[in-house]
Amino acid sequence: MSTKVTIDPITRLEGHGKIDIFLNNEGSVDHAYLQIPELRGFEQFAVGRPAEDMPQITSRICGVCPTAHHMASTKALDDLYKVEPTRTARLIRELFYMTFFVEDHALHFYYLGGPDFVVGPTAPKAERNILGVLGKVGMEVGLKVITTRKHLREMMTEMGGKVIHPVLGKPGGVAKRMTKEVQEKYAKVARDAVDFGLFSLQVFRDIVLKNSAYVDAIVSDTYTHKTYYMGMVDKNNQMNFYEGDIRVVDPSGKEYCKFPTGKYLDYVAEHVEPWSYMKFCYLKPLGWKGFVDGPDSGIYSVAPLARVNVTEGMPTPHAQEAYAEFFKTLGGRPVHHTLANHWARLIELLYAAERMVELTADPEIIGENILNIPTNTPKEGIGIVEAPRGTLFHHYQSDERGVLTAANLIVATAGNAARTAMSVDKAAKGLIKNGKCDDGVMNMIEMAFRAYDPCHGCATHTLPGSMPLILRMIDPNGNLIEEIRRDT
């Protein structure tokens, strides 16, 4: 008779989830499932809404990455109304977005994923958090992290109106121009962000790369999958978070396809399983082959590791040096080790900070022409950006009044969903032996999903069947009278 071990709730991520692990009679893992039991359903909420409301509506999907949804939605409105934003507006948008990237990647490294390495994978549960990180690296470092994020968020508030639910983007431009005074203040924050990026990479070298046990974990088969990788690149196949084509490489690192944003439905499809509210993306030309990796599988990955695998270099100098060090240390492109996402995330943080410096130095960023007024009749629009968690697709259709008739949101976590499910299953099988599953092992299984920095609140749009429900009736004294369950 099999035994079930459940990790519920899983921790240090956005959204909710649980892991069910089924053991056989020998105490080995038959299978482990990462289940997402929440449903947001924003695609349906959007139907019937004015298109110009979407950058504000979709930013409510998630409190961690509202800016990614705001920017993808704004770009979808550009396309819906067939209006090109002014150059000044594009500069302001990208600067705003790079600021968000630095702040968000810092959040994940120091608060969410970082405790696994900085404090230790098997450290006491009560210490695997930001307080544990501060205890390990010292209050001075902690103050640096907190201060840097504070200044970044202040600049986002300055330009976006609100840091969580920005009101910056408009079809054809932005809502607010940048003054000379703000530009100078922003430039200092950008330079400090570069120092912070360099500092964070040194923290990673000192704490992770100098610890052979951590390096062994990163390159172990337990945390390795040979899948396809997807990410946005510029015309030189270098990294770009804001605009460019989508590039996919195969498990050997060879380019599989490269397509403009408007062609995404020719390459991306979604598979539904009955045990999750999240869809599982795959490459449409290869088809859904199940939860398997390798060149014949259609499963692909997004997020930092995928982006450094698809790009042929970084467009900023310090990030390029870090990129070269990454592949030299881990054996060349592509890198298939899931936990290497943490290192790749810091390389991206540095790139975004350096890009902030470039953008604040552009004299046109304080130009007065920040908006082209749309004049075309809306019909259909697609907007794609690289969110911190991976490639994010917004696709809207509307009537001639600009009222939405359909919306398709493929979020980064859905892009990683199949690989993440495989990662949890493989980690459970590699780490649980003879039925022994202590708190440290449970956390190391969670590390398999945490490396992707998932956002399940963003990713849950499907109704796979009957909604699981537990109904409990309690009398005035707190006694359970009856429990009715619908588990499937």
Image (cartoon, helix red, strand yellow):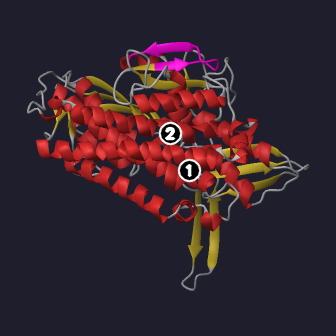
Neighbour class for label 1 at 10 Å: few (<14), some, many (≥20)?
Answer: many
In the picture provided, is 216 more to the left or to the right than 76?
A: right
The numbered disc on residue 113 is 1
Q: What residue type is labelled 2?
A: Arg
Residue at 26% x, 53% y: name it: 154
Element under label 1?
A: helix
Sequence-first tag of 1 and 2: 1
Name the spot of residue 167 as percent of width and height, x first: 22, 45
254 within the magenta span: yes
Looking at the picture, tell me which residue is in the foreground, 147 or 446. 147
Q: Is residue 16 at all visible to an observer of this figure?
A: no
Q: Is residue 55 at all visible to an observer of this figure?
A: yes
Where residue 473 sits, quadrant-wise, is bottom right
Q: Is residue 126 above or below residue 234?
A: below
451 within the magenta span: no
The numbered disc on residue 345 is 2
Q: How far apart are marks 1 and 2 (CA)?
A: 11 Å
Looking at the picture, tell me which residue is in the foreground, 296 or 118. 118
Region of the chain picked out in magenta, as a range: 247-260
